[in-house]
Image (spheres, helix red, strand yellow):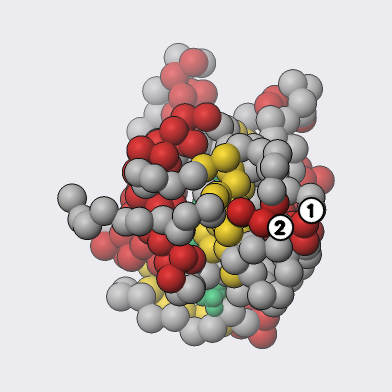
Amino acid sequence: MGPVHHWGSGMAVLAHHIPEAYVLAIRRAGPGLDVLTSVGGDPAIFRSVLFWLDVPPNLSALPSLGLMLSLGAGVERLTAAGTVPDHVAIGRISNDIQTEGMSDYVLLHVLRQHRQLARLQDEQRRHHWEWRLWPRARDVTVGILGLGRLGSEAARKLALMGFNVRGWSRRRRQVEGVESFAGDAELPSFLSACNHLVCLLPLTRETENILDARLFSKLPRGAFLINAGRGGHLDEAALLAALASGQLAGATLDVLRQEPPPADHIFFENPAILLTPHSAVCSTPEQIAPDVVENLRRAERGDPPLYPVDRKAGY
Ligand code: NDP
Ligand code: OXD
């Protein structure tokens, strides 16, 4: 156990619409920390706000606010709202649990597509037995849109499995065994070889609807898609058209525009689509709480959060 931290007296943290289990775990991880779930009395006591899916509406009413901390990796709702005063830092939780979980997810679904498990299951249901030859991993290219914390680790592991791996980011990145493409100018050549395309981008003004008909048309015919970024990256009608035409052979989607989707969402019925309920990465309250407390300590010292968000870039 590290030294006991003495939190500034009279200061508190606002946990805005955070499930109780997380609030309790954060209180346990930061003894003495005053975590409140509503503003109630004096708004000047709040130095930090914890949020996840819901963004508090009136941040300018908190005069001592120094940190907005997202309990998840994506911060698109907050950056889109544009309500954070300039002097307030924005942080997000990013950790090994996320990178490991996302790598598992990406490997699982690339392999599932690569070995065409959906087709095998369908054939089994039809009592059909047919021997088949599979391409070697080295003859298959996997492209990762977003070579950040999550994308680079998934890319590295796919490369270790023998796939040709390439990644696309704003700035050129160095990841062992992975070919790096950067910026809009290199997107078409990046896409041109991707048999599997994995989206691990943050949702920003630049990346919204990036998975559209134009992008699909630049992929080799019969490519597979995996979207574990955000539902707002995908033009849903364009996906259905690309699957119907055979331009895409299948899609695995962890995220949708509306979550949970309506029970009659057309994706539920499409055999070429596998839906996973935004569960590529799952962290327990106990796994997140130490990182939250460390970020709050840093805010008290006036240090930047562990994973600061560049509000201009939107992630
Ligand atoms: P990072 O910020 O570490 O990485 C983002 C990557 O996207 C960077 O490589 C960045 O480029 C690239 N990027 C951003 N904008 C552009 C652009 N306009 N053009 C090209 N590349 C761009 O984020 P994480 O890896 O931690 O997370 C990525 C996203 O994954 C999250 O924002 C969230 O939406 C999603 N997510 C989903 C989860 C799930 O359960 N499905 C769980 C956790 C996260 P550069 O390297 O140049 O900065
Ligand atoms: C995240 C997520 O952004 O779970 O952390 O989607």
Image location of residue 66, percent across then percent down: 60, 66
Where the C terminus falls, by quadrant? bottom right
Looking at the rendering, the quadrant in which ligand 1 lies is bottom right
- In the image, taking residue 55 as reference, residue 11 lies left or right, namely left
> Secondary structure beneath disc 2?
loop
Measure how far apart labels 1 and 2 are at the Cα level. Answer: 8 Å
Quarter of image, res 129: top left
Query: Could you classify mark 2 by the number of other residues whose Cα lies within 10 Å: few (under 14), some (14-19), or many (20 or more)?
Result: some
Residue underneath mark 1: 58
Q: In front of the other: label 1 or label 2?
A: 2
The answer, for residue 142, to whether it is visible in the render is no
In depth, the one of 293 and 270 nearer the eye is 293
Query: Could you classify mark 1 by the number of other residues whose Cα lies within 10 Å: few (under 14), some (14-19), or many (20 or more)?
Result: few
Image location of residue 143, percent across then percent down: 50, 65
- Labelled pair 1, 2 in contact (Cβ < 8 Å): yes
In depth, the one of 124 and 260 nearer the eye is 260
> Secondary structure beneath disc 1?
loop
Quarter of image, res 211: bottom right
Residue positioned 49% across, 44% down in the render = 34
Residue positioned 61% across, 54% down in the render = 46
> Disc 2, ligand 2: is the CB inside 8 Å?
no
- In the image, taking residue 110 as reference, residue 194 lies left or right, namely right
- In the image, taking residue 218 as reference, residue 48 lies left or right, namely left
- Up the image or down, 151 lies above or below 31; here it is below
Residue positioned 66% across, 85% down in the render = 185
Image location of residue 97, percent across then percent down: 35, 48
> Disc 1, ligand 2: is the CB inside 8 Å?
no
Residue positioned 20% across, 55% down in the render = 2
Q: Amino acid at mark 1?
A: Asn
Badge number at residue 62: 2
